[in-house]
Image (cartoon, rainbow, N blue to C red):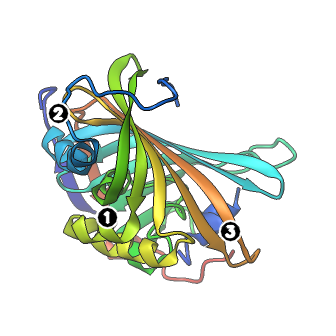
Amino acid sequence: MERQRRRRGPAVAAAAAGLMACATGCSGSGAAAEDPRGTEDAVAVLRQAPATLVRAGTSKARTSMEMATGGTRVTIRGEGVYDYEDQVGRLRVLLPQDPSGADEHRPITELLAPGALYMKNRGAGVPADKWVRVATATLSDGNLVTGGATDPFAAAELLRGTREAAYVGTASVGGTPVRHYRGTADLAAAARGASQGQRAALRAAAKGFATATVPFDAYLDDQGRIRKVRHRFSFVNDRRQGTVAVASTTLLYGFGTPVDVRLPDSGDIFAGRIAE
């Protein structure tokens, strides 16, 4: 397998479309407040947040994606690690139980890389020892939604498109004091300012989403690192000919965690047809 590896100390779909069909602790004041730093500009701070993650190196991540379908709200959860410099990560994604209450879905292993999403235990006729590879630029949402978990660095890079934002107040995420910001990001602007590895996928999302702007809440620690970010996406569901609202939450913690991600060799990738 091709290997992407990062070790640091503490200082420092068409194929995937069926995944969504198969199927966060903080508090803050409710009104805008004055930032205790006084001269800090919220928009500038948020636009710099992705670069701060690159300097931080690596972290653990938890993801949560909520959507309403058929009158029922479902949640897909993920957990893993991410390397922000190499833009590779690994998530274990848990699909919700079926309506009968039986847990029929095995966890899906997702490998995230610039321009690609790899999935194992995808099901739908894919052999157990094979991976499904999807070029994220071919997805109408740029894999912000389709994979059931937003790529943690893509979630951060959306903040490069921040058009307006306000400081809400102080909060706590996982016991860490944070500053809470609320605003909207422009998808096209985020794509223009994104790193090369995320640019094509975000361009696809800018064309494919129902709205050009994405509301968000972001929580940054004293070092400017994202600890939590929640986006509210709106996209068109071709099957139902309607607009679907999805809330995606990403939690980042354990900065400096060793990350060892091995991308599949070509012979390990399933080349057959993926059933819906």
Does residue 125 appear in this view? no
For marks 2 and 1 on the same chain, the one whose residue lies earlier in the sequence:
2
Residue 39, numbered circle: 2
Amino acid type of the residue tagged 1 in the rendering: Ala
Amino acid type of the residue tagged 2 in the rendering: Thr
| In front of the other: 80 or 164 | 164
| In front of the other: 98 or 202 | 202
Answer whether labels 3 and 1 touch (C-beta < 8 Å): no
**Residue 27: percent from the left, percent from the top?**
49, 23
> In the image as oriented, which residue stretches furthest toward the top?
175
**Which element type, helix, strand or loop, lies under badge 2?**
loop
Q: Residue at x 50, y 25 (%)?
A: 25
For marks 3 and 1 on the same chain, the one whose residue lies earlier in the sequence:
1
Q: Residue at x 36, y 59 (%)?
A: 112
Residue that carries the numbered disc 3 in the rendered image = 243
Position of the C terminus by quadrant = bottom right
Disc 3 to disc 1, C-alpha distance: 22 Å
